[in-house]
Amino acid sequence: MSQPNHPLVLVTGGSGFIAVHVILKLLEQGYRVRATLRTMSRQDEVRAMLMSGGLTNLEALSFIQADLSSDQNWDAAVQGTDYVIQVASPTPNKVYKDENEMIQPAREGVLRVLRAARDAGVKRVVLTSAFGAIGVGHINHKGPYTEEDWSNTDANIHPYQKSKTIAEIAAWDFIRQEGHGLELATVNPVGVMGPILGHDYSHSNESVRQMIEGKMKAVPKIYSDYVDVRDVADLHLLAMLRPEANGQRFIASSAENLSMLEIARILRKHLGEDAKLAPRREHPNIVVRTLAIFNPKLKMIASLLGQDMSTSNQKAKRLLGWTPRSAEEAIAATGRSMVDIIKGQMK
Ligand code: NAP
């Protein structure tokens, strides 16, 4: 049970898939949480997601309106907080006409949050970055990506991945040049799966929905790493608290490289009849590249064909004692939540 003197943590983008799981862990562990929302009318939805995650008492949770694209309220949002977890960022849920519609809020939003945190005397900011800031835009990369790697923004990479890379670089530059002692750690998740607590789920779960509904008859030949959202939340808390996490990036990954066909197989294994429409064949790369010319939603997928996106999770395990679940467990949990959403059983 949280007390008035327990540390206060600001979580930005409190309505998001990952942020809700971070808030859930923080409240479970007795922290007080202030969450930013772009739209304050979503408060009840966030409370409902936390209750469906098992919480019964939300007295230690409060909300404040803030948008990454505006200076308004950020000083008030960080006031009195011990830590800030900066999760909010434009994600590929919708198609943007211009890459700057993603890049500007991502970069400037991070800088707004860091400036406000520094001025308010916050101890540490944890930034939710992404694998997209680590391992894209490289040709013929050998071996798993590590925290030493950075995506190549000069290559023709997707605006989302560019936005994450540019925002993270800006964050580290800020800490070096004008942080005045503010601490920073980043968590860089690969594809995040796991239990969905409400109807507004992340882009990373969308392919599971399409597989279950039979809308994906065949899959692109993409090999990716996955991680469970509960483990991503745990890693945020470790990165926030552990002295050795200061100044470090951490890849959040189960470090198992799976094809999309393997995801479909896992769904069939765990969901039985509910996943009977999951795909059983792969598209040739040429088909996906051609479709992406006409369908902007496929552009990111097409840019990942033939890429080795395997990652190492050794740093988080070694330095912080982080113990992620398997990719299979994460994917099966997404599948079960998605079936509840599709059947209308999710409140
Ligand atoms: P999500 O469910 O779409 O959440 C995104 C959150 O960011 C939402 O709360 C959204 O608010 C907020 N947001 C977007 N633009 C904003 C703006 N201009 N001002 C204020 N808030 C804004 O996605 P998610 O998967 O949880 O992603 C959370 C973070 O994890 C992001 O930084 C993302 O890049 C990172 N990440 C995700 C994955 C993944 O596989 N899911 C992998 C690596 C990294 P609204 O509800 O108002 O739209």
Image (cartoon, grey):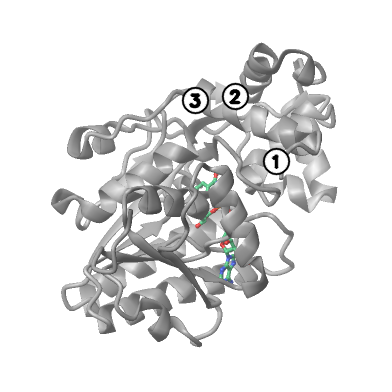
Foreground pick, 13 / 53: 53
Disc marking residue 300? none
Q: Which of the marked residues, 1 or 3, is nearer the chain's N terminus?
A: 1
Q: Position of residue 153 (x, y in %)?
A: 49, 58
Disc marking residue 206? 1
The residue that mark 2 highlights is 332
Q: What type is the residue that disc 2 sits on?
A: Ala
Q: How much space separates mark 3 and mark 2, taking CA atoms?
A: 8 Å
Q: Which of the marked residues, 3 or 2, is nearer the chain's N terminus?
A: 3
Residue at image location 53% in from the left, 63% down from the top: 89
Eyeballing the image, is 208 above or below 34?
above
Residue at image location 76% in from the left, 28% down from the top: 211
Q: Quadrant of the C terminus?
A: top right
In the rendered structure, the answer to whether residue 221 lies left or right of residue 227 reads right
The residue that mark 3 highlights is 327
Q: Position of residue 284 (x, y in %)?
A: 75, 24
**At numbered mark 2, what does the secondary structure look like: helix, strand or loop?**
helix
